Amino acid sequence: MARNDSFEKVFDLMLKEASTKLLEEEAEQLLSEQVDEHEFSVEHKKKMEKLFKKPEKTFFITFVKRHKSLVAVFIVLAMLACVSVPNTKAIKSVFMNYIFDKNAPGTRIIFESNNSAHYTSKNVNIGFIPEGYSLTLEKGEGLKKFLNYENGEKWFDFHIKDLEGMLTIDTEGAIVEEIDINGTKALLSIKPDVKILVWSSDDYALVMDGNIDKETLIKIAKSITVLE
Amino acid sequence: MILFSAIETEDDRKKSERLYEKYKNLMYREAYKILKNKQEAEDAVMTAFVRIINNLHKIDEKNHKATMAFLVRICVNVAKSRIKNISNQLNNEESVEENTQNTDIDYIPHEFIISQETNNTLKEIICSLKPVYQEVILLRYYSDFSVLEISEVLDEKTDTVKKRLLRAKKIIAKEYEKKANIKEKAESEVCLNGKK
């Protein structure tokens, strides 16, 4: 077995070398053809700016452990969208210390926590799955879990995420409501084609989205339990 | 759309922008070849960056050529996913994979020689693999992505990625042995002819 292990390691190293060589040769081919400068659309540029935006403490929501009496601070996203859509004044709704810019394609939420249990494994149980829905995609584990359920054209996703990093949600033109999920404040962003629900616990954030009706989405959310 | 992204440091932000500025036109060109639509191709470039942004630290900028080809591949993968739902096409393939029991260590060749020639042979074999297998091999071995990270980049289940990786390695091992046997046979024939 030991021989096989080392044999496999060497083989893996050779695959790494061969993969690198293959990519280098591909690059030569790619460059053999002229690369024209493409004028990317304004919309694309804005999206990329938002994607690459570095969080700054004063501009982002910070989630901290509630029992340490720390407060969530908020972020506003770029006002670029407001500039590009002069006829629509930016309307911001403030809920739970969040500010959603209705003209911005996405709102980012930065999570921060002093909790040391970020990478502990969690078992998620969704107690209520509406009739006709089945699990079609399951990815990740622990605090990086993603589940997708579908029933024909209808679908909903569930994500659990540690409180590190950030979450960008599409709130452009959305109606945002504050609701209660088993005693925890949650944000519900409603757009014609998708609803997004975000809430958090001491060491993880929970996100649901889907095109199912609001009541069902909330019912599912309330049925979710996260076990150590 | 919900994006989980993790640009948390100035270094990460600069790196993302650098990669984007350097390769956006090339990525766009390749995406456009597939999608034939300006906006779709631009979206493919963005989605490619969304998919890699959590693993920026694994992107080695030192090897400029390999990095370029790697990013273009991710973009092409996004573009291809956009024009067709490849999952249906893969279902049959993966049901075959599920039945492939890993009863033996047949995902590494029984023997191989560490040489430039072997390296070239492996490169040719990887090149001849179906795109779905090529992608996982390159992500795993060029970029050292974990199964979970590959699943995020390709937007596939971790189980699917695991199966594809194993299947790809089996194919490579099998093909390598086939080529090695052919070569060995040819050499022994030359040797015999020489003796005659």
Image (cartoon, coloured by chain):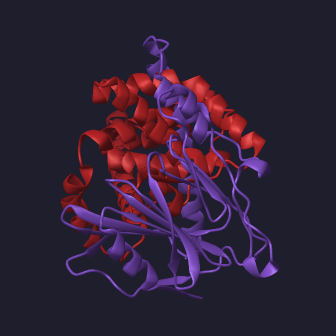
Chain colours: A purple, B red
Q: Residue at x 41, y 46 (%)?
A: B135
* Residue B84, position as x, y percentages in the image: 23, 43
Q: Residue at x 53, y 55 (%)?
A: A11
The vertical placement of A136 against B41, above or below, is below
Front residue of A45/A191: it is: A191
Front residue of A122/A166: it is: A166
Q: Going by the image, does B155 lie left or right of A55? A: left
Q: Is residue B127 visible?
A: yes
The N terminus of chain A sits in image quarter: bottom right
Q: Going by the image, does A9 lie left or right of B147? A: right
The C terminus of chain A sits in image quarter: bottom right
* Residue B51, position as x, y percentages in the image: 50, 47
Q: Residue at x 74, y 60 (%)?
A: A73
The vertical placement of A199 against A192, above or below, is below
Q: Residue at x 51, y 63 (%)?
A: B148
Q: Is residue A22 visible?
A: no
The vertical placement of B183 against A112, above or below, is above
Say how many tags the image has. 0
* Residue B45, position as x, y percentages in the image: 46, 33
* Residue B41, position as x, y percentages in the image: 37, 29
Quarter residue A199 falls in: bottom right
Front residue of B148/B196: it is: B148
